[in-house]
Amino acid sequence: MKTYWFFLLAYLSFSVSFGQNSPEIIPLPATYEGGEAAFFITSKTKIHYTDDHLKEEAYFLQKELLNRKSYPISIQKAETNTKGINLILTETVRDGYHLFIDQSTGITISSSNETGIFQGIISLLQLADQAEATSDHLSIPTWNIKDAPAYSWRGFMLDESRHFFGVEKVKSLLDWMAYYKLNKFHWHLTDAQGWRIEIKKYPKLTLVGGIGNNSSSFTPAQYYTQAQIKEIVRYAAERKIDIIPEIDMPGHATAANKAYPRFSGGGSEKYPEFTFHPAKEETYHYLTAILREVDALFPSQMIHLGGDEVSFGNQQWEKDAQVKQLMASQQLEDLKAVEDYFMKRMADSLFSVNNTILAWDEMAEAGLPTSQSILLWWRHDQPEQLQKLLDNNIPTVICPRIPLYFDFVQQENDRYGRKWGGNFNPLQRVYDFSLNKLNIPASKAPLILGFQANLWTETVTDEDRLDYLTFPRLAALAEVAWTPEEQKDFDGFSSRLKKHLPLYHKAGIYFFDPFNPDRH
Ligand code: TNX
């Protein structure tokens, strides 16, 4: 008995101190055991799927394995097979997935749904990326993993108005999001500096509004055609990622107003032509027509309407006779009430086509219906805004500037990028973030859908800069949103992360190296 305890303790302390007892997977799975033996994937291994619904996932796995090993692995619709990789739909695994790897029975990924199967495939691919490989096999450790996400919203936002990156870069980001089981891509497509989504009814939005970026007013128009948007939406769907387009209003509208000045509500000296006109009936018709086209492109049935920082440029509203009239007739007391009125009207026109509305936390008291709205809390220095969201029972995504704005730099001595009042977002600060830091009462916790990081691109002039700010913090974000709090551990994460850096390198990603921060 004594010897037994000795060995148990010795084993535990060994595995804890050397971090050997967790699978090489980011985000770390909720539960796992095993890992001592191995199953070999060879050119003879087959992928079996039991249900036609899993065909797409089977092909995805085949393609990704082919990218890793040069031999093709064939696919069969069949019952499970001990020599292969089995994809099984089963009601017994309701949330997430079960990945069971056994030396003799092969690899089984089961879930009640395709998303779970996909998540299991990603875990398998991460194991494959770290596996010992010879010319004819990949040696996959025999883990038994039962895993499900802590939060349903695991998001990343890219601002393509301030700088535009294009189809290939977005696809690469979607690849990495999928690799980290992130599932919501919030696409900030319009802002003062450029309108980036083609709208057939109003072609000047892109032809005129697409000209320029945050670095120059003369850059030729850059934008996504509707065909390109469809291609990206399809690509994201293959990776189980929903895309939420943002059409920012009534502020941040300068680029649109350049194209169609008759809907402008004016701006301020610093932010000219910043708003849409809130008191012209035709503004609502115009924007509704735009949003209908946007809605038709995105199957997520979610559109983000912005609603942020309107006060930066709504001064002209006060002087405008039509706005005054609107305020009187609708009993709107101040400009904030005008803003809320605007958003409610726009939301109404999307509810009629069954959309959920997203907006920034400025809309906490606009009275949007809680069953069809989601708000994003971003002002870390205004915890009262989060409080209001929860008081009003609004489903909420957590993306505070500190620590989840990726335009804030990762290290002290970076010369470019944001660092306000000494505040910036190093890897560990991102990693250590959790709901515990926000003192949310248990009764309100179910309102929190999850977490999101936002990459604003005023200072992101090219792809290298984008990579440098995004990687490896994207991996830390994944663990914040997926891994149960009690499983998180920065040292364990760091040792797994270290092995992802060669993968970034291979993919041509210009990442920040937290283990060697002076690399350049
Ligand atoms: C605030 S976050 C903004 C963006 C800026 C960002 C810079 C939000 C809703 N609005 O327009 O790009 O700060 O960090």
Image (tube, rainbow, N blue to C red):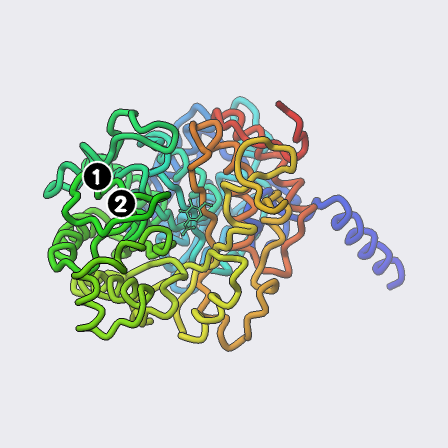
Q: Is mark 2 within 8 Å of ligand 1?
A: no
Give the mark nearest the N terminus, 2 or 1: 1
Quarter of the image where the N terminus is located: bottom right
For this view, does 516 lie left or right of residue 352?
right
Q: Secondary structure at mark 1?
A: helix
Q: Residue 213, percent across and down?
A: 34, 32
Q: Is residue 123 left or right of residue 90?
A: right
Identity of the residue drawn at 42% across and 64% down: 396
Crowd rating for badge 1 (residues with CA inside 10 Å; few <14, some 14–19, many 20+): many
Closer to us: 370 or 105? 370
- Picture coordinates of residue 139, whole percent (x, y): 57, 34
At 29% from the left and 55% from the top, the residue drawn is 305
Secondary structure beneath label 2: loop
Is residue 194 visible to the viewer in this orientation of the structure?
Answer: yes
Q: Is residue 56 visible?
A: no
Q: What number of labels is visible?
A: 2
Q: Amino acid at mark 2?
A: Glu
Q: Which mark is residue 84?
A: none
**Residue 362 placement: quadrant:** bottom left
Mark 2, other Cα within 10 Å: few <14 / some 14–19 / many ≥20: many
Q: Which quadrant of the figure contains the C terminus?
A: top right
Q: Which mark is residue 273?
A: 2
Residue furthest to the bottom = 443
Q: Nearer the viewer, residue 61 or 216?
A: 216
Q: Which residue is mark 1?
A: 258
- Specify the amino acid type for callout 1: Lys
- Mark 2 and 1 residues: CB-CB less than 8 Å, in contact? yes
Q: Residue furthest right?
A: 2
